[in-house]
């Protein structure tokens, strides 16, 4: 039986999800200079499993809800998602949190374009406009440094990694749209986390380090924040329609901005301020088109 409609609760859970996700990114940023990337991804994934399994068990979906008729679909979605996680954390190590998360907002734009190429959906002005605005925002973000020759290799690598993460996330979301027709959200999330853990373990021969007390706490926090963020996001969509929650998707960029200013003491650049409305408007256009398509072609 579906949960009763409670838009206020759904909106509150969506905002809480953004705060928890920001907490995960803060933990990742805090340890990114001393802990190898694969080790960070492993801790994030391993400790995210704890709240996820408890949540599924309380909903009586563990382990029965993990049964699947589409193992290949899960493998592809989980692989794209795990690679996106690696690229995202690598970008966070090279950029400010606000910049990395802002570029991640390109994901719905790229998802809308991927739906045209992979699912045969129509190429509309909404999608073209979203793509143009989004990438105009990225150009605005990096152009002052490129023009002055002041962009470091590390920073440029961060921008490229953030773009790669957004692209891989878009492909993963396309697969989620397909999997949602037959698979439970719990199973989709579980196999993604499992794939990220396995991928992270493969980096063990590259050299992990023994984290100290505070660093270990940050690594565990990244996993717990990420796990609870997913749960609150799932619950938000149980209590409120996606159309009601959509405007609050963009509040999530506020928390990384505050983290940069108050925790990491990183100033916001003028180029970021100029890029922010362009990318968010592009994402909003693309998300609007995706919702219109979903209404025309509802999942059975």
Image (cartoon, grey):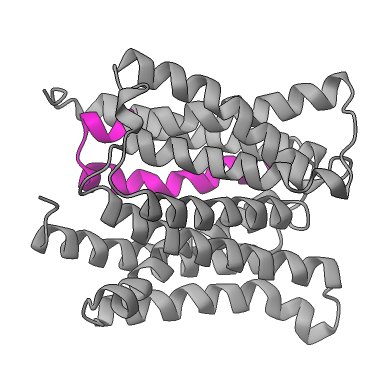
Q: Residue furthest top?
A: 58
Vertical comparison of 98 with 12: above or below = below
Q: Mainly helix, strand or loop, the magenta region?
A: helix
Residues in magenta, as a range: 235-259
- Is residue 26 part of the magenta span, yes or no? no
Q: Residue at x 43, y 38 (%)?
A: 189
Task: Please tell me how many numbered marks the rendered image carries.
Answer: 0
Q: Which residue lies furthest to the bottom in this view?
A: 147
Q: In the displayed structure, does residue 260 sit left or right of residue 3?
A: right
Q: Where is residue 258 in the image (x, y as percent from the top left)?
A: 64, 40
Q: Which residue is drawn at 79% across and 66% down?
A: 155
Q: In the displayed structure, does residue 167 sit left or right of residue 242?
A: right
Q: Where is residue 134 in the image (x, y as percent from the top left)?
A: 47, 73
Q: Which residue is drawn at 33% across and 67% down?
A: 286
Q: In the displayed structure, does residue 170 sit left or right of residue 275?
A: left
Task: Please tell me which residue lies in front, 210 or 266.
Answer: 210
Residue 101 visible in the displayed image: yes
Vertical comparison of 1 with 130: above or below = above
Q: In the displayed structure, does residue 283 sit left or right of residue 120?
A: right
Q: Position of residue 175 (x, y in %)?
A: 35, 58
């Amino acid at each position: 039986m579906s949960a009763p409609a409670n838009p206020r609760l759904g909106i509150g859970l969506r905002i809480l999800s953004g705060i928890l996700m920001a907490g995960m990114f803060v933990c990742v940023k805090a340890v990114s200079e001393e802990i190898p990337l694969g080790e960070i991804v492993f801790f994030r994934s391993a400790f995210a499993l704890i709240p996820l399994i408890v949540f599924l068990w309380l909903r009586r979906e563990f382990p029965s809800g993990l049964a699947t008729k589409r193992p290949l679909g899960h493998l592809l979605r989980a692989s794209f998602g795990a690679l996106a996680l690696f690229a995202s954390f690598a970008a966070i190590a090279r950029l400010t949190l606000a910049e990395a998360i802002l570029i991640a907002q390109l994901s719905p734009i790229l998802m809308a374009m991927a739906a045209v190429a992979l699912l045969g959906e129509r190429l509309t002005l909404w999608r073209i406009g979203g793509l143009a605005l989004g990438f105009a925002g990225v150009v605005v973000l990096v152009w002052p440094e490129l023009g002055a020759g002041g962009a470091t290799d590390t920073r440029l690598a961060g921008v490229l990694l953030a773009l790669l993460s957004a692209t891989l996330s878009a492909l993963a979301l396309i697969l989620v749209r397909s999997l949602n027709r037959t698979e439970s959200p719990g199973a989709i999330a579980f196999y993604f986390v499992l794939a990220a853990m396995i991928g992270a373990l493969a980096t063990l021969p590259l050299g992990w380090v023994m984290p100290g007390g505070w660093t270990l706490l940050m690594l565990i926090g990244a996993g717990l924040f990420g796990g609870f963020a997913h749960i609150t996001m799932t619950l938000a969509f149980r209590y409120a329609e996606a159309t009601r929650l959509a405007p609050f998707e963009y509040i999530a960029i506020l928390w990384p901005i505050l983290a940069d200013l108050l925790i990491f003491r990183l100033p916001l650049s003028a180029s970021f301020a100029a890029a922010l409305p362009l990318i968010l408007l592009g994402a909003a256009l693309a998300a609007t088109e995706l919702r219109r398509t979903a209404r025309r072609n509802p999942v059975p």
